[in-house]
Image (cartoon, grey):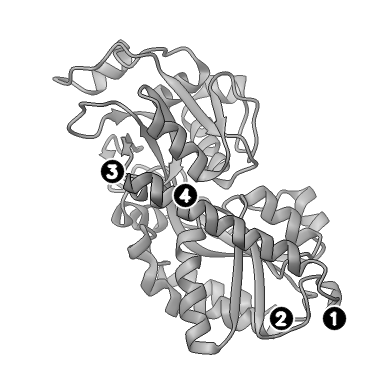
Amino acid sequence: MQTKTTLIGAAAAAVLALSLVAGCGGSGSSTGGTGAGTSSSTLVGAGSTLVAPILTQWQGDYSTAKGVTVTYGAIGSGGGIQQISSRTVDFGASDAPLTASQKAGCKGCVMIPWALAATTVSYNLPGMSKPLRLTGPVVADMYLGTIKTWNDPKIAKLNPGVTLPSTSIHPIYRSDPSGDTYAFTDYLSSVSPAWKSKVGGASTSVSWPTGTGGKGNAGVAAAIEGTPGTVGYVAIGQAVGSQLQYADVQNQSGAFVKPSTMSIASAAQTAHFRPDNSVSIVNPPASAKTAYPISTFTYAIVPKDSGKLSTLKQFLTYAVTTGQSSATKFQFAPLPQNVAARDRSIIQGL
């Protein structure tokens, strides 16, 4: 089956990349304390599974254009932060900004928003011919366990004329520290007072009231694909690649919006940088009428003390400029001009 083959191939690539990451960790020391080796013709990264598809494209293109080999282990945002903090890789990647303690632990790391995607609300309901409409509070109630079946009146009200099954709802969540979890919980806490009071705000890991965990985007997608009645949050590239069903989610203007490169780009128009270079575009204002409300930036995390800083700066500049031409191919939206310009300024200042 094509979807399973895709997942198996992606998993194998991730394992291979991770083995290379682990191998580089002990390959000599570099100036400035980075532990990923000294060669300026190689860069090793690890982290976010959301950004992995476009990074795969960048790896091949950049190696061809510049002769620099870029290796990446898609181990999750939490793992990427840990690895760059211990300097076993040259760069980390996370869909969640560094917390204050993570920033202190990373000792001089800088965040650069280098890609723009979305987290979908995916599900498995055989026989549905068009996407379901869902709201943030309804999705929160699914994960709180207070909405238990797919034909619940709250879901039926949002989908008039649709025959919904009485199938039990089984939530799937990320078992590993995840930037998708951060974006998803950031959204739920902003639209559901019940969620915020019972579970809390945005975080890469939370104590889930109900459901089953899956590791990585591929693990969550496989769990959804294998069991009718499941619902889960999955990066848009993974959802499309695994041919999952995913919902149109209501934004603040009241519109039910399909996640797409255009609706992600619409959300990004509301972006404002914080002092630490993080940017939140979750649940954008009602003025962004066509914005998908669970859109997110994902970040490169780079240490200022790297012995490969010159090589890193060149690769990062490529990623936020020329590399954006590959964005829509993998369901990413190209960076807005103001974000790309700010990124170039951050990179030059490293």
Between 179 and 255, the one nearer to me in the picture: 179
What whole-number distance in Å separates the C-alpha atoms at marks 1 and 2? 10 Å
Q: Residue furthest left?
A: 161
Q: Residue at x 39, y 44 (%)?
A: 4
| Residue nearer the viewer, 213 or 285 | 213
Q: Which residue is mark 3?
A: 258
- Which is nearer the N-term, disc 4 or disc 2? 4
Q: Residue at x 32, y 57 (%)?
A: 261
Name the residue tied to disc 4: 8
Mark 3: amino acid: Lys
Looking at the rendered structure, the secondary structure element under dot 2 is helix
How far is disc 1 from disc 4 in space, using C-alphas?
Answer: 38 Å
User: For residue 303, what is the image quadrant?
Assistant: bottom right
The kind of residue tagged 2 is: Leu
> Real-space Cα distance between discs 4 and 3?
27 Å
**Element marked by disc 1:** helix
Which disc is residue 31 wearing? 1
Going from the N terminus, do you reach mark 4 or mark 3 first? 4
